[in-house]
Structures are given as C-alpha cells and as structure tokens.
Amino acid sequence: MMSYFYIFLTIAFTVYGQIVLKWQVIGAGAFPASPSEKVMFLMRLVLNPWVISGFLAAFLASLTWMAAMTKLELSHGYPFMSLNFVFVIILSNLLFHEAITMPKLVGLGLIILGIVVGSRS
C-alpha cells in the first residue's frame, strides 16, 4: 500500500511544480525578443522563490518515485504517472481558465483507460 502512497506523492509533487511554474511564467510577462533580455528574464524566474519551490518539488518527486520503484515493477507503476496529465489539465482549467475541449476530454478518457489497462498485473 505504501508504494501507491509514494506514487501519489510523486504525482502531487510533479503537478505542483508544473502549476507553480505556469503561474509564475504568467506573472513574469511576455518572453523578450533580445537574447540578453531572454537571459535576464529566465534568471529572474530561476531565482523566484516559487519557481525554486517547483524545482524542489521535482526533486522530491524523484525521491518518492525511487521509493515507489523499490516496491513495484516499473511496468506496473509507470502508467500511473499519466495521471499527471489529467490533474494538470483540470487544474489549468480551474486556475488559469484554460479550455477543456472535446479532444482534450477524449484524450483524458484514453489516458484513464490506458492507466486501467496498463496497471493490471
């Protein structure tokens, strides 16, 4: 049972990181045109505490994934990682008002079906 908790934590950390990065990129404004401005833009983002927390979440996701892999076969656990797509699309809609179109819904349905089929032992 702990292995599924580790997978849940991996998904939670991964989704958190993606959502935080998007939130901070939105707040940072448009990507500049000149190379020097691009570097400065990215440096400001990299030094942003929220972005750093997203990087930390990615690192923690790696640790919890390693813990999960000590308990599960990769071919069993890895399909669950597709839930990242499901949660990111839902949260992107709720937080950033990104559209959930019919093709996205079909894709989400296929992902969920793939998780069910792929995770069966």
Image (cartoon, grey):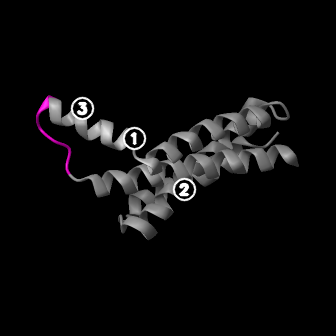
Query: What main secondary structure does the magenta stretch of the protein show?
Result: loop
Task: Kindly identify which residue carries mark 1.
Answer: 47
Q: Which residue is at 72% across, 39% downward? A: 64
Q: Of discs 1 and 2, which sits in the foreground?
A: 1
Position of residue 46 in the picture relative to residue 79 (left or right): left
**Is disc 2 placed on a helix, strand or loop?**
helix
Residue type, label 1: Leu
The image's mark for residue 39 is 3
Q: Secondary structure at mark 3?
A: helix
Vertical relation: 113 (above or below) 45: below
Residue type at mark 3 is Val
Q: Tag 2 or tag 1, which sits nearer the N-term?
A: 1
Residue 118: x and y in percent read 70, 41
Q: Residue furthest left?
A: 34
Tell me the magenta residue range: 30-35
Q: Nearer the viewer, residue 110 or 2?
A: 2
Residue 3, can we see it? Answer: yes
Q: Is residue 38 above or below residue 5?
A: above
Residue drawn at point x = 76 percent, y = 45 percent: 6
Q: Which mark is residue 86?
A: 2
Q: Position of residue 91 (x, y in %)?
A: 49, 63
- How many C-alpha atoms fall within 10 Å of the one at disc 1: few (<14), some, or many (≥20)? few
